Amino acid sequence: GQQLNQSPQSMFIQEGEDVSMNCTSSSIFNTWLWYKQDPGEGPVLLIALYKAGELTSNGRLTAQFGITRKDSFLNISASIPSDVGIYFCAGGGAQRTNFGNEKLTFGTGTRLTIIP
Amino acid sequence: DTGVSQNPRHKITKRGQNVTFRCDPISEHNRLYWYRQTLGQGPEFLTYFQNEAQLEKSRLLSDRFSAERPKGSFSTLEIQRTEQGDSAMYLCASSSDTQYFGPGTRLTVL
């Protein structure tokens, strides 16, 4: 199935550094979401974006919904050890139906590792 | 805990056996989704319910797969005659506007 292009695939950083990752698509989406997944667990919602151009923060996390509706980025400031994990972007609402179907199309993930 | 729950968390089965997974959504959510995630990939959409109605099925959902949500609350996903390629994490999500995921059921087919 289709997966969104997410970059970088992996990041190795030191604690305290800022992190930036992005997600691009050839299709337009009406919502963008960012999830974090720990090994053996389901994705946990970090930030949801509903409007093109929207910039939203959640603590040390900031995400933006691209103006073209084909991309989004996520920034993490002052990384801490618990930020380790896999980050997924997801686009929703690519095909509007009468039922408001919002099946999500996920990116390929960015694995964040913090070097001691 | 009022989040999405899934049972079992792990299932090991032999090829050719049938398996069934259960998802209990957040109680006020009327939409329920199933996704499959293989190693190193993001989740992929399988099927979607609004209340008890199954509104869309992905091409990934072969004839061996069936999902139900009989009373518009919990849902089950059954895989018949399992194959090794069915080994994956099966994720359930529920939403009223934004999707919240359960912990998943990891299926290993030997």
Image: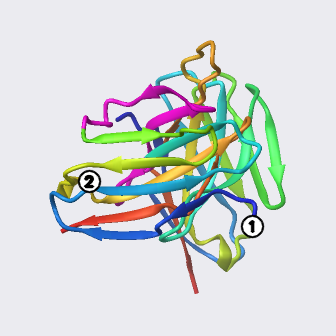
Q: Magenta residues? A: B36-63
Chain where mark 2 sits = B
Say what secondary structure mark 2 lies in.
Answer: helix
Q: Residue furthest bottom?
A: A116
Q: Residue at 34% of width from left, 58% of height from top? A: B88
Tell me the kind of residue under disc 1. Asp
Question: On the image, numbered disc 1 is attached to which residue?
Answer: B1
Give how far across and how far down residue B76 sits, in percent: 47, 48
Q: In the rendered image, which quarter contains the C terminus of chain B?
A: bottom left
- Residue A8 in sight: no
Label 1 crowding class (10 Å Cα cut-off): few <14, some 14-19, many 20+?
few
Label 2 crowding class (10 Å Cα cut-off): few <14, some 14-19, many 20+?
some
Instruction: Tell me if residue B23 is in the magenta stretch.
Output: no
Quarter assignment of residue A36:
bottom right
Q: Residue at 15% of width from left, 57% of height from top? A: B16
- Residue B41 in sight: yes
Which residue occupies the foreground of this view, B64 or A9?
A: B64
Which residue occupies the foreground of this view, A105 or A17?
A: A105
Give how far across and how far down residue B71 sits, in percent: 60, 39
- Would residue A92 be found to the left or right of residue B14 on screen? right
- Would residue B39 be found to the left or right of residue A103 on screen? left
Q: Residue at 29% of width from left, 71% of height from top? A: B12
Tell me the kind of residue under disc 2. Asp
Q: In the rendered image, which quarter contains the N terminus of chain B?
A: bottom right
Quarter assignment of residue A95:
top right
Question: On the image, numbered disc 2 is attached to which residue?
Answer: B86
